[in-house]
Image (tube, helix red, strand yellow):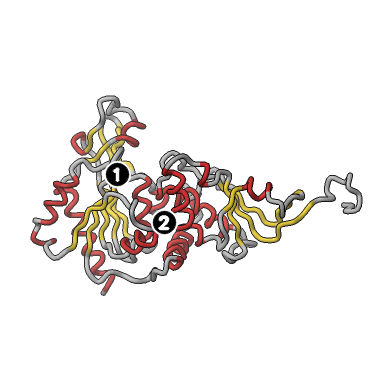
Amino acid sequence: MNHQNQTDPNSNLSYLDDTYLIYQILPDGDMNFGHVIFDDAFGLFANLKQFRATRYSSPKKNHVLVFRSCSQFPGNLSSLCQKFTEGIFPVITSHQVQSISSLFNSSVNSNRICFRELVAGHGSTGAVGWGPNNFNRAEVFSEFRSKLLVAHGINPNATPQQHHIMLVNKTGRRRFNNMNEIYSKILTTPRYSDIKVTIVNDFKNVSITQQLALFQTVTVAISPCGGISLLFFVLPRHSTLIVSSYPQLSKDVYTPGRMEAQVWDFQSHLHVIHYPVNASDDFTLSSEFKNTDWAALRNHANINLKVDKLFPLIDQAILTAARKRI
């Protein structure tokens, strides 16, 4: 390379010495927090851990580049994107997340740029892997959780001293149809009389720190499957997530499908139970969908919680927490 010869195409080449991670926000339709955590942030974190050169890298050394900046999203998606970015990415970088275009268009980097370390891509297995391709990520999941909580000033090893059951009242698809009924029955069941029970609708008016701190008080979370359930990977040690399954039709018989199993099977600090959906009266579908359509059953079935199925799982969760404390 001849720096003196301006006709040399490499004469204006400059190097960036730190580690740069590049990604594209995937859940850009609704900015689902659970998917932002695992499809975006955890994917980058896991990539760092898979390469020897970056395995012990510091957030001071890491820079995150995004294809599409938060300002490019319409309406409230822009503010949600910014909220999630500021709340999650300190786990990876201590620098402000910036768009690729802003890096290349900056006056400081007017020359051609070469990255010394560039981390990109999740591969065919996605951010969290699938089955045998998961590469035993339990340790990486645990480290990501711990670092996220520490970044918000929360002790990742603390455990609640009293039980707290949290019910997730999701709107839209995959919701629980009879949330208020179940809430009332829990409150009026004598063996749960001393247990705090809350329903959460959304977290729009709380910060990420407040949301994570609230989760640290929960010993039993009951959530629909899908992206919203992914939030609960930060639950305290020895707690239980009861997450609904979805109906699968096999030879005219409904069997429970386990969504996000590739995440839940590799959580070492958390006990995960899948609420079984295995009968035609366990769910409802809008008239626009057929109850034989696999995609409709997976993506649009709303769940009818049943006391005789749910309460034994709650009892199991409470006993599990008690045994772990001994």
Q: Residue furthest right?
A: 5
The residue tagged 1 is 245
Numbered label tally: 2
- Residue flagged by tag 1: what amino acid is it? Ser
Q: Name the element at disc 1.
A: loop
197 vs 97, left or right, is left
Q: Residues within 10 Å of mark 2 (few under 14, many from 20)?
A: some
Q: What percent of the width, then of the height, locates residue 210?
A: 35, 61
Q: What percent of the width, then of the height, locates residue 294?
A: 34, 31
Does residue 102 lie above or below 299 as drawn? below
Q: Residue at x 29, y 44 (%)?
A: 245
Mark nearer the N terminus (1 vs 2) = 1
Circle on res. 266:
2
- Residue flagged by tag 2: what amino acid is it? Phe
Q: Residue at x 47, y 41 (%)?
A: 28
Q: Name the element at disc 2.
A: loop
Q: Residue furthest bottom?
A: 326
Q: Can residue 131 be seen from the camera position used here? A: no
134 vs 323, left or right, is right
In the foreground, 88 or 242:
88
Check if mark 1's residue and mark 2's residue have beta carbons within 8 Å. Answer: no
Circle on res. 30:
none
Q: What percent of the width, then of the height, locates residue 174?
A: 29, 40
In the foreground, 125 or 61:
61
Q: Residue at x 18, y 36 (%)?
A: 281
Q: What percent of the width, then of the height, locates residue 251?
A: 29, 30
Does residue 82 lie above or below 191 as drawn? above
Q: Can residue 195 be seen from the camera position used here? A: yes
Calculate the distance from the C-alpha at mark 1 to the C-alpha at mark 2. Answer: 17 Å
